[in-house]
Amino acid sequence: MIVLEFKIKGKQSQYQSIDEAIRTAQFVRNKCLSYWMDGQKVSRAELYRYNTQLRAEFDFVKDLNSHACQASVERCWSAIARFFDNCKKKVSGKKGYPRFKKNCRSVEYKTSGWKLLDPKHIEFTDKKGIGKLKLVGTWDLAFYSNDQIKRVRLVRKADGYYCQFCISVDVKEEIPPTNKTVGLDVGLKEFYTDSNGNTEPNPRFYKKGEEKLKRHQRLVSRKVKGSANRKKAINRLSRQHLKISRQREEHAKRLARCVIQSNDLVAYEDLRIKNLVKNHCLAKSIQDAGWYQFRKWLEYFGQKMGRVTIAVNPSHTSQQCSNCGAIVKKSLSTRTHVCACGCRLDRDHNASINILNRALGTTGHVGTWILSPNASGDLSSTIAGSSCNSKIGQ
């Protein structure tokens, strides 16, 4: 499944119709959630039946395509199911009890309610009055049939309206093996340090754009609440936030693709970002680094290109000596690992070697992986018949 995004061009009245469709989808979701809260053991099927009652009771709900209303019910049930799943797993802390949506930004259609006129134009056929819209983008939808398009989503962002197509297609990409392995240790000083000693600088997009954000925030505070000028100032602030988030996402995507293309096995830490950001001194820097996006794209490209990606337990990877295995205690301010065995490495380099060693230790059931003595990350040998093209479980 892939998602292709286009910016859409239309009239102001069409944009207002899209906003109305989004508000209707939000209304259906919140009403279904309220029905679940008031009822006892309300099932998914009962929520669908309640959606039918809403369409009969409210004309503006009936104007929205029936599949779009069903998609809103599915969003509601997804939040409910995630809450129950967290309770069964006994997740520590808050379990994610479903909450009402105040400012939804998208409406999702299934296989009806829209019609693709040509690769650059789409028409929505429900009674919301959206009509024909122009698609602006470099993707070519002519390569895919209408049967492959499973969902169409209209999204409102700070810089305009977008149309996303969820397409069912095989995303496998065949690339030759490199016979190399690598371990990655992410950090704040450097974005990551690999087991070969190479580093990637941390771009710190939020820190670089913080002055602009502060200036835009001050302009928002000076405007009268509810005025048109305040809405314009809020939009400028939102655009700046959107720019930073896109920079961070593209940076993570570019690096992840390069790492996956260059190695047959990639090992990284199984970090719990939710717990790390509880440190109020480092929370902003951790969020700015974008470790989660990087891991997400590593796993995506690993599956797409047939590479092995392994998330290992990060416990004591910085304290353990990569040469002899002894524990050498050090604070965060200590950036050099010095062991009694004579091993002297950068702290992050030492950690990345430990990450790779742990990952290689978990692949014994698919083959024997031998780390070269100089920890260069080369894949020395594997058992005959073993495959590097299957993704190891997380």
Image (tube, helix red, strand yellow):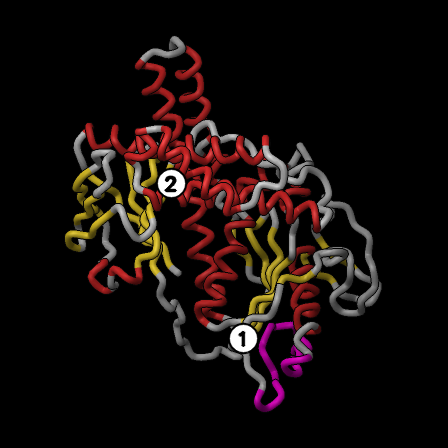
Secondary structure of the residue carrying tag 1 is loop
Q: What segment carries the magenta color? A: 365-385
Residue that appears at 76% across and 69% down: 323
Q: Specify the quadrant that holds the C terminus.
A: bottom right
Residue 315: percent from left, percent from top? 75, 56
Magenta stretch: includes residue 377: yes
Quadrant of image for the N terminus: bottom left
Pick whichever, 75 or 194, lies toward us.
75
Identify the element where label 2 is drawn.
helix
Residue sitting at 70 percent across and 51 percent down?
A: 89
Task: Name the side, left or right, on which 291 lies relative to 372.
Answer: left
Residue 15 position by quadrant = top left
- The kind of secondary structure the magenta stretch mainly shows is loop
For the residues labelled 1 and 2, the Cα–Cα distance comes to 39 Å
Q: Please name the residue shown 31% across and 29% down the image.
A: 60
At horizontal 65% and vertical 56% (from top left) the residue drawn is 270
Asked if the magenta segment contains residue 366, the reply would be yes
Task: Work out whether 297 lies above or below 158.
Answer: below
The type of residue carrying mark 2 is: Cys
User: Where is residue 12 shown, x and y percent of the image?
Assistant: 19, 28
Label 2 sits on residue: 69
Count all numbered tags in the image, as a single digit: 2
Residue 319: image x %, image y %? 77, 56
Name the residue tied to disc 1. Answer: 390
Of labels 1 and 2, the one closer to you: 2
Q: Residues within 10 Å of mark 2 (few under 14, many from 20)?
A: many
Outermost residue, bottom side: 384
Image position of 171 with respect to 98: above or below? below
Q: Is residue 132 left or right of residue 247?
A: left
Q: Is residue 134 above or below residue 103?
A: below
Amino acid type shown at disc 1: Ser
